[in-house]
Amino acid sequence: MGGYLFGGKEIYNPCSILKYMSELADYPDAFPSPYWAVSCSNHIIKKFVEDWEFHARDDIEELIAGHTIEKSVRESISYENIYDDQDSLWNLLFFTGYLNQSGRRIDERTQCAKFAIPNYEILYIYKRAVERWSSHQLQSADLTPLLESLKSGDTDGIAACISLELRKTICFFDYAERYYHDFLTELLRRMGSYIVRSDFPSNYGRSGITLRPLSIHGRALVLELKAVSSLREMEMGCDEALGQIARKGYEESLKDDGYQEITCYGICFCLKECLVKKM
């Protein structure tokens, strides 16, 4: 609720504070809520997220991660041209309080400001907008090439399809293995054609993701995921994933259920890149 500076003083949203104090009077265990976020339309954020250009996704990720981005300041923008280009939208977010300024400099004749998200309440608004946008992107994605690549064992095709969808997304959970696991599970479920089970128990542990065709005569799939911090580690990550599948017998539960054809994939992620190897 804070994060705004006036005359060098940090100012908090008085409406949100009074609302919270009012709730505390009746409910001592009341938890602070994003009152502004749920009471206003936030049309500006929605419009920005829906219309951003590809390169703006990295900026959004930086902001949501708690970092700053630097943009030129345009104090003379008018309402009729605010949606003309990306720079105007960044400035609109600043002037309407969805970004604050943590520093400013002069670059020749241009003023450049460091922008940041002011507080957790505004961060909540950004995250909600990104989640809605990401869900819409997955719903509209053509996943036929991914399905065909999985069925045929085309590891390059699988990697290309997954990497393409990753580049369309915005990550605000850090690039940890759990993020990739949830992302890929959602992607596979939207693909259809398989019963997708995440962290399904096997004889010796819990496999990453299993895909079961409706008929036991179809080809079942086992996917184990790894995340690494550098591109040069990706092949090793795939090998580690395949080794884990073999070592822990992730195929056995599928065989016990009558599936004869099973393909195992080791999938490794680094940022928005994906590498796939099969057993």
Image (tube, rainbow, N blue to C red):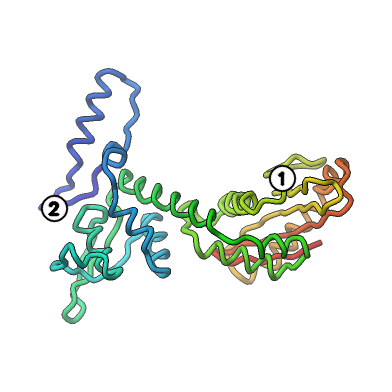
**Residue 152, image quadrant:** bottom right
Judged from the image, the secondary structure of the residue bearing numbered disc 2 is loop
Q: Nearer the viewer, residue 58 or 165?
A: 165
Q: Label 2 sits on what residue type?
A: Gly
Residue 37 falls left or right of residue 174: left
- Looking at the rendered image, the quarter that the N terminus falls into is top left
Residue 125 falls left or right of residue 92: right
**Residue 223, image quadrant:** bottom right
Judged from the image, the secondary structure of the residue bearing numbered disc 1 is strand
- Looking at the rendered image, the quarter that the C terminus falls into is bottom right
Q: Label 1 sits on what residue type?
A: Ile
Residue 142 location in percent, x, y?
Answer: 59, 61
Q: Is residue 40 visible?
A: yes
Q: Nearer the viewer, residue 193 or 102?
A: 193
Q: Are marks 1 and 2 in contact (CB under 8 Å)?
A: no
The numbered mark, 1 or 2, whose residue comes first in the sequence reads: 2
Residue shown at the point (32%, 32%) measured from the top left: 32
Residue 16 against residue 238 in the figure, above or below: above
**Mark 1 → mark 2, Cα distance in angstroms:** 57 Å
Residue 208 location in percent, x, y?
Answer: 70, 49
Residue shown at the point (34%, 47%) measured from the top left: 125
Residue pointed to by mark 2: 8
Residue pointed to by mark 1: 195
Nearer the viewer's eye, disc 1 or disc 2?
1
Residue 83 location in percent, x, y?
Answer: 26, 65
Q: Residue furthest left?
A: 7
Residue 132 falls left or right of residue 116: right
Residue shown at the point (37%, 58%) measured from the top left: 49
